[in-house]
Image: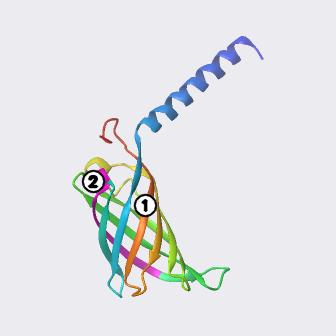
């Protein structure tokens, strides 16, 4: 390998490392607890608490049919999701894997960078919800974890 090639590889490596460090500095851990009530039709509303900067109200609007999975006791379905906080709105799409026997589900939410407002404008990331349905099958309790990456340098304060 000649000297110019080595120099170019070193420079390229430094640029990639700088971009990764910059993105990491713009990301913030997300945690909290969610309680949502399903209206029996297509919407669940609730609150996110114990999340500090993420505390607020939630709205999930379900769309499309549920789909079967290789496990006959589980189905998958989707919803839009909006979290309204004092810092703005965080929006995304949630994909559910729901066990119809136990009432438990796991949910992955991909944040929509075009949907956010306030500090969430341009934000990206993933949130994960681990949900246990109560016996009434209308109120859902979940723990939330994940990461929100902000578009601006100082938006995560």
Query: How many callouts does the rendering have?
Result: 2
Residue 17 screen position, x and y as percent? 55, 29
Q: Residue at x 24, y 51 (%)?
A: 87
Q: Quadrant of the C terminus?
A: top left
Q: Element type at marker 2?
A: loop
Q: Position of 24 compared to 117: left or right?
A: right
Spatial CA distance of label 2 from label 1 is 21 Å
Report the front residue among 71 and 20.
71
Residue 62 painted magenta: yes
Q: Position of 12 compared to 82: left or right?
A: right
Q: Residue at x 36, y 75 (%)?
A: 61
- Which stretch appears magenta? 52-64
Q: Quadrant of residue 152?
A: top left
Badge nearest the viewer, 2 or 1: 1
Q: Element type at marker 1?
A: strand
Q: Residue at x 40, y 72 (%)?
A: 141
Residue ID for mark 2: 117
Q: Quadrant of residue 73?
A: bottom right
Count neighbours of disc 1 (C-alpha within 10 A) and say few if under 14, some if 14 to 19, many if 20 or more: many
Report the front residue among 59 and 139.
139
Residue ID for mark 1: 144
Task: In the rendered view, tell whether residue 18 sits above or below residue 111.
Answer: above
Residue 69 screen position, x and y as percent? 63, 79
Residue 129 is tagged as: none
């Amino acid at each position: 390998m000649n000297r110019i090639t080595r120099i170019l590889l070193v420079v390229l490596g430094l640029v990639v490392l700088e971009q990764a460090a910059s993105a990491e500095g713009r990301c913030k851990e997300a945690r909290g607890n969610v309680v949502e009530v399903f209206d029996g039709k297509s919407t669940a509303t609730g609150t996110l608490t114990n999340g500090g900067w993420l505390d607020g109200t939630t709205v999930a609007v379900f769309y499309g049919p549920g789909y079967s999975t290789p496990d006959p006791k589980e189905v998958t379905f989707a919803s839009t999701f909006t979290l309204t906080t004092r810092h703005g709105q965080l929006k995304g799409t949630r994909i559910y894997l729901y066990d119809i026997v136990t009432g438990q589900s796991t949910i992955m939410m991909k944040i929509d960078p075009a949907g956010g407002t306030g500090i969430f404008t341009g934000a990206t990331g993933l949130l994960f919800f681990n949900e246990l349905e109560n016996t009434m099958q209308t109120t859902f309790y979940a723990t939330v974890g994940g990461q929100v990456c902000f578009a601006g340098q100082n938006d995560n304060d």
